[in-house]
């Protein structure tokens, strides 16, 4: 959530930056600032009234000690009026603060200056590319056919037991899945991330803290009986560890990682590009999160991008990196880099990771702060990245490393899954 102070200090720049998302928030921001001015005026009036009331209370105490009860009672009448005025002012403050909060929650994060003002994925900027796109043998199969041939994944059984988008992994398919999780966690551990096994359900306060609520209710599975949500990503519980926390500056950066299943309704997702593992309702992912000082968060972002590069190169998967345009970027992000791997049998690029800097947007919702050298509280910057999401990684591994007899396992992965080939 954008801060009131940033809107006061930098209104024009923020409005211009948000235009990259093709939204005009001018009237909303003007209204927020008008309410904020009214709130500050109300606060000043309230503070003055409370000071007068305190002074009168002291005067009443003095008169009572002097035995001047009649004079004291006369002043008490004034304090009763003041209490009524104080109550009215507090109610006005509450209403103004609630109105400001309601509107701020609808305004997305202001994009970083490097973000271009595109409208859709076609306007994203490719910033890097690595690896050669493999040439497959005649008769090469897409991953869903390979999964069936080698009994790795059973999509029909998943549909029977639960529904579409909930596959069963079996045999070497299950071992491959487990090996990838181990590999990603091991790499994160070596990079200094502390591993957590977080809850798979969150409350609405946590959903608000990282920006899933009120923006993405329709994409999350909700248990109405207990008002809990299945997590769409480990980012949510991991980042919320520091909700309402004042961290010590010397503790920064805080580096967290975790493996979880993730759950997304993916309402409205249809077509050939969602076949097989391309888009699921339940999938496994290792997430990395950093909480850092605002002055170095963009260096941190670069290091997280490099971490994902290392994973993909170890898996020998050709990839490209896209800096998302304003129209394709998430609601809470200031800048996002998407990683896509090439799926040779499908002949298309598949997104496998997003690495984002949210600057203070999540931190303001979370109330996650640190005390700077001047002793004043400051908001941290939060960042997160998929390192990595498994379904499309598995799809690309099966397709890109297949030959006439089976599937080759990349050398870096063999020790984690326990075999060199799937035949």
Image (cartoon, rainbow, N blue to C red):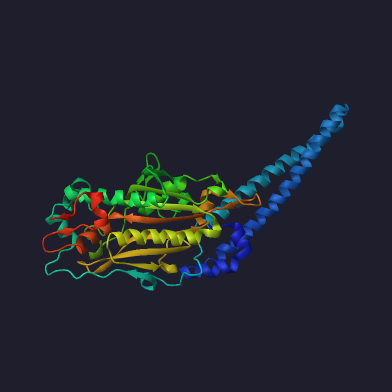
Quadrant of the image for the C terminus? bottom left
The residue lying at 29 percent from left, 54 percent from top is 390
> Where does residue 78 sit, x and y in percent of width and height?
79, 39
Q: Is residue 183 above or below residue 71?
A: below
Q: Is residue 393 left or right of residue 387?
A: left
Q: Relative to 51, is 214 above or below?
A: below
Which residue is at the front of the view, 166 or 136? Answer: 136
The answer to whether residue 168 of the structure is visible from this angle is no
Image coordinates for residue 270, horizontal then vertical, percent: 26, 62
Between residues 384 and 218, which one lies in front from this camera angle?
A: 384
Where does the image place residue 27, in percent across and percent down from the top left? 56, 65
Q: Is residue 286 in view?
A: yes
Q: Nearer the viewer, residue 33 or 13?
A: 13
Q: Quadrant of residue 413?
A: bottom left
Q: Is residue 348 above or below residue 310?
A: below
Q: Is residue 243 left or right of residue 385?
A: right
How many marks do you count on the picture?
Answer: 0
Front residue of 1 and 188? 188
Residue lying at 73% horizontally and 50% vertically, measured from the top left: 45
> How far across and down, in percent of the image, does residue 354 sit?
38, 60
Q: Which residue is drawn at the image coordinates 40% and 61% (left, top)?
A: 306
């Amino acid at each position: 959530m954008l801060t009131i102070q940033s809107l006061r200090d930098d209104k024009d720049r923020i409005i211009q930056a948000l235009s990259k998302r093709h939204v005009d928030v001018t009237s909303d921001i003007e209204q927020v600032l008008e309410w904020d001015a009214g709130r500050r005026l109300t606060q000043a009036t309230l503070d003055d009234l409370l000071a007068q009331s305190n002074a009168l209370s002291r005067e009443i105490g003095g008169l009572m000690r002097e035995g001047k009860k009649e004079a004291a009672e006369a002043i008490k009448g004034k304090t009763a009026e003041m209490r009524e005025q104080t109550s009215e002012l507090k109610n006005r403050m509450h209403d103004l603060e609630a109105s400001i909060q309601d509107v701020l929650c609808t305004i997305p994060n202001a994009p970083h200056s490097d973000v271009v003002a595109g409208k859709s994925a076609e306007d994203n900027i490719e910033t890097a590319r690595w690896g050669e796109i493999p040439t497959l043998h005649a008769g090469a199969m897409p991953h869903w056919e390979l999964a069936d041939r080698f009994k790795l994944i059973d999509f029909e059984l998943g549909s029977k037991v639960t529904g579409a988008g909930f596959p069963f992994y079996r045999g070497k398919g299950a071992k491959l899945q487990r090996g990838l999780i181990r590999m990603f966690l091991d790499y994160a551990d070596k990079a200094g991330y502390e591993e957590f096994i977080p809850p798979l359900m969150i409350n609405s306060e946590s959903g608000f803290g990282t920006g899933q609520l009120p923006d993405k209710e329709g994409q999350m599975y909700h248990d109405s009986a207990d008002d809990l949500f299945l997590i769409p990503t480990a980012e949510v519980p991991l980042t919320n560890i520091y909700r309402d926390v004042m961290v010590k500056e010397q503790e920064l950066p805080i580096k967290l990682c975790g493996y979880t299943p993730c759950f997304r309704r993916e309402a409205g997702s249809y077509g050939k590009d969602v076949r097989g593992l391309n888009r699921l309702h339940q999938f496994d992912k290792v997430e990395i999160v950093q909480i850092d000082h605002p002055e170095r968060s963009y260096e941190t972002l670069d290091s997280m991008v490099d971490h994902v590069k290392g994973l993909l190169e170890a898996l020998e998967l050709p990839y490209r990196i896209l800096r998302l345009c304003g129209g394709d970027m998430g609601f809470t992000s200031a800048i996002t880099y998407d990683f896509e791997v090439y799926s040779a049998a499908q002949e298309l690029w598949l997104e496998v990771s997003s690495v984002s800097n949210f600057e203070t947007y999540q931190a303001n919702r979370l109330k996650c702060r640190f005390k700077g050298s001047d002793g004043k509280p400051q908001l941290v910057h939060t960042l997160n990245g998929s390192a990595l999401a498994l379904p499309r990684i598995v799809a690309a591994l099966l397709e890109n490393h297949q030959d006439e007899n089976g599937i080759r396992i990349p050398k870096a992965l063999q020790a984690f899954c326990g075999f060199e080939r799937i035949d």
